[in-house]
Amino acid sequence: MKPAPITANERIVSLDIIRGFALLGIFLVNMPSFFAPALKYDFYGLTPEYTGVDQWVRLIFDLFVQAKFYPMFSFLFGLGFYIFLTRAEKNLEEPTWLFVRRLFILLLFGLLHLILFWYGDILHTYAVTGFFLLFFFNRKPITILIWAIGLISFYYALLASNLLAPESLLERAQAWNQSVGSEKVAEAVQIYDQGSLIQLLTYRFMNEVLPILENLPYQIPHILGLFLFGLYIGKKEIISNPSLHKRFIKLTWIISGLIAIPFTVWLTAIQLNLMDYGAYQDIMSLFVLTVGGPFLTAFYIFSFVRLLQKDRWQRFLKPIGITGRMALTNYLAQTIITLVILLGFDLYNNIGLTIGLLLTIGIFILQVVFSVYWLNRFRFGPLEWVWRSLTYGHRQLIRLEKQERDTD
C-alpha cells in the first residue's frame, strides 16, 4: 500500500483552527517588516519613531502579538511531527525517510522564499531544526520535557548574557549604531524604492539572506525547544484527547495566564518608559518580550483547546480552521500579495502601522474566503498538494468528488 496523507476526516479540527489563528498572528508580526527595512533597524539596534495611533498599535503588538505566534507555530510543528510520524509508522517500515524527504522539500520552499522574496522566512529554519526532532521521537515524554526546558533556558541565558556587558561599552556601540545604522536604513529604502530587480536581488542576498543564514545556528536551540513542547503534548495526547486531560489543560491555562500577566505589565512599563534601564533598555525589552511570550502563547493555545471542546465554537471558527489547513499556501501568499501591493504602488516605507494593520486584516479575510472556496473543491491547498505529492513520491488526487463535497 502506498503511503498517503491524512484525509479531512482524520484531521484534528482544533489543531487546524489554532493553526489558522497562528497564521493570522504571524502575518501581523511580519507586517511591519514587509513595508520597512526592519532587519536593518534590528541589526543596528534602532527603534523606528511611531506617533499617534501607530504608537499604540506598536504597544499592542508588543504586548499581545510579538513573540507569541511564532512559538505557537513552532509548537504546532512539533505536534504535527508526532502525528505525521506516528501515522507513517503504521504503514511503512522506515517512516523516518518519509519525514526526511518532507523536510528537504520544506527547506526548498523556505530557501526560495528567503532568497527570492523576503528575509523573514521561517520555513528554512523549521526544516533545518526539524531534523533534530528525529532524535527525540522515541524518547519518553519526561525526557522530551526536560530537554525542551533546558534548550529554551539556554537560549534565555544567552539573551541575558548581554546584560553583563559594561554600560560604557553599550553606550559606545549604540552611538556607532546610530551613525552607521541610519545610513544603512536609507540605503535599504533607496534600493527597494528605486533599484532594478537585479539590484534588489543582489542587495537582498548580500545584506539580508546571508546574515539570516549566518544567524540560523543561534535560533536552533530556541526553536527546537518549542518543537519539543509540541512533541511532548502530542505524546501525552493532550490535544487529540482533551476530555482525558481536562485537569492538566485547565491548570496549564490558569498558570500560563497568571505568569503572563506580570511579564505583560513589566513590558508595558518598559515600552512606556515608566522603567528606565539606561543603556540596557532595549536589551531588557527584548528579554522580557522573549521570555514572557511563550507563557501568553500557552494561554492562547489552551484557551482555544477549552473553547473548542464545545461544538458551537468549532462550527463558528470552522473558516479559520479551513484557512489553517492551507497554512503553507497562505503563509507564502501573504508575502507575495503584500510585496506586490507595497512595491507595485510605491508604498514601501510610506505607510504606518495602522494602515499596515488594516491591510493585513483585509488580506487575511480574503485568504479565509479563498481557502473555504478552494477546499470545498479540492483536498489540499495548491502548495500543500505539491509538498505532499513530492513527499509521498506520487501525484496526489487533489479534486474532491461530488459526493465528498456534499458530505463535507
Image (cartoon, rainbow, N blue to C red):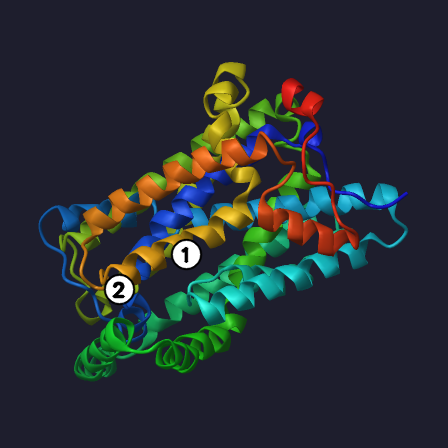
Q: Position of residue 192 (x, y in %)?
A: 28, 72
Task: For label 1, count other residues whose C-alpha is less than 10 Å away and answer few (under 14), some (14-19) or many (20+).
Answer: some
Name the element at disc 2: loop
Which residue: 32% across, 40% down?
Answer: 361
What secondary structure is found at the residue carrying circle 1?
A: helix
Q: Can residue 289 be seen from the camera position used here?
A: no
On residue 36, the disc is 2
Q: Residue at x 27, y 79 (%)?
A: 166
Judge the density around disc 2: few (<14), some (14-19), many (≥20) Cα neighbours within 10 Å: many
- Judged by depth in the image, the label closer to the viewer, 2 or 1, is 1
Looking at the rendered structure, the kind of residue marked 2 is Ala
State the image coordinates of residue 116 (x, y, percent, origin top left).
47, 69
Answer yes or no: is residue 385 visible: yes
The amino acid type, in three-letter code, at marker 1 is Thr
Residue corresponding to mark 1: 335
Q: Nearer the viewer, residue 379 or 80?
A: 379
Along the viewing direction, whichever of 131 and 2 lies nearer the viewer: 2
| CA distance for labels 2 and 1 | 14 Å
Q: Residue at x 38, y 66 (%)?
A: 160
> Does 258 appear above or below 71?
above
Q: Is residue 181 above or below residue 22?
A: below
Of the residues under marks 2 and 1, which one precedes in the sequence?
Answer: 2
Q: Quadrant of the C terminus?
A: top right
Q: For this view, does 29 lie left or right of residue 404?
A: left
Residue 60 spot, x, y in % from top left: 24, 44
- Position of 281 relative to 31 (above/below): below
